[in-house]
Image: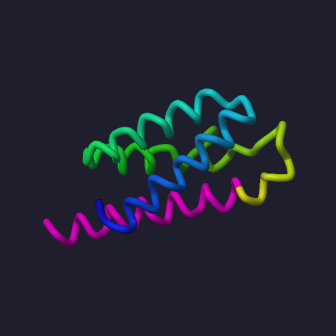
Amino acid sequence: MGPKTAELVAVLEELIHLLNTDGNNHWANWMTKARALIVNSDFSGIEKVLAAYGGMGSFNDVYLTKITRENCQFSEHQSKAWELATAIRHEAEIDT
């Protein structure tokens, strides 16, 4: 696992924790599945992360409702996960 992938796994772990704490089971489960795929070296986990973003009702629209003081941190993790997954996909496209 490369450094960007390891960082993405760590960011996903933080997102999963925050989502679970806030009671957002749908997105916690989504990111848990994506993380598991990535940890198992399955590139579809990267695609799953990226598929969460964009459009109405997407992960971009999620905000925390129960732990508001951590909303800023959550938003930073949302952005970081997108950036890392995009970079990893781009690198994979260059290698093929």
Look at 41% across and 41% down and name the residue there.
Answer: 34
Left or right, 6 with respect to 78, comes to left
Left or right, 90 with respect to 12, comes to left
Look at 40% across and 43% down and name the residue there.
Answer: 48
In the image, which residues are magenta?
A: 74-96
23 or 91, which is in the foreground?
23
Q: Quadrant of the C terminus?
A: bottom left
- The reply to whether the magenta stretch includes residue 85 is yes
Q: Is residue 45 above or below residue 81?
A: above
Q: Is residue 92 above or below residue 48?
A: below
- The reply to whether the magenta stretch includes residue 80 is yes
Q: Quadrant of the N terminus?
A: bottom left
Left or right, 69 with respect to 90, comes to right
Residue 51 x %, y %: 44, 45
Q: How many marks?
A: 0
Residue 61 x %, y %: 68, 46
Look at 46% across and 62% down and name the residue there.
Answer: 7
Residue 33 x %, y %: 42, 34
State how the image is colored.
rainbow
How would you classify the magenta stretch by its main secondary structure?
A: helix
Residue 95 x %, y %: 16, 70
Look at 63% across and 50% down and name the residue there.
Answer: 60
Left or right, 60 with respect to 42, comes to right
Dividing the picture into quadrants, the one containing residue 63 is top right
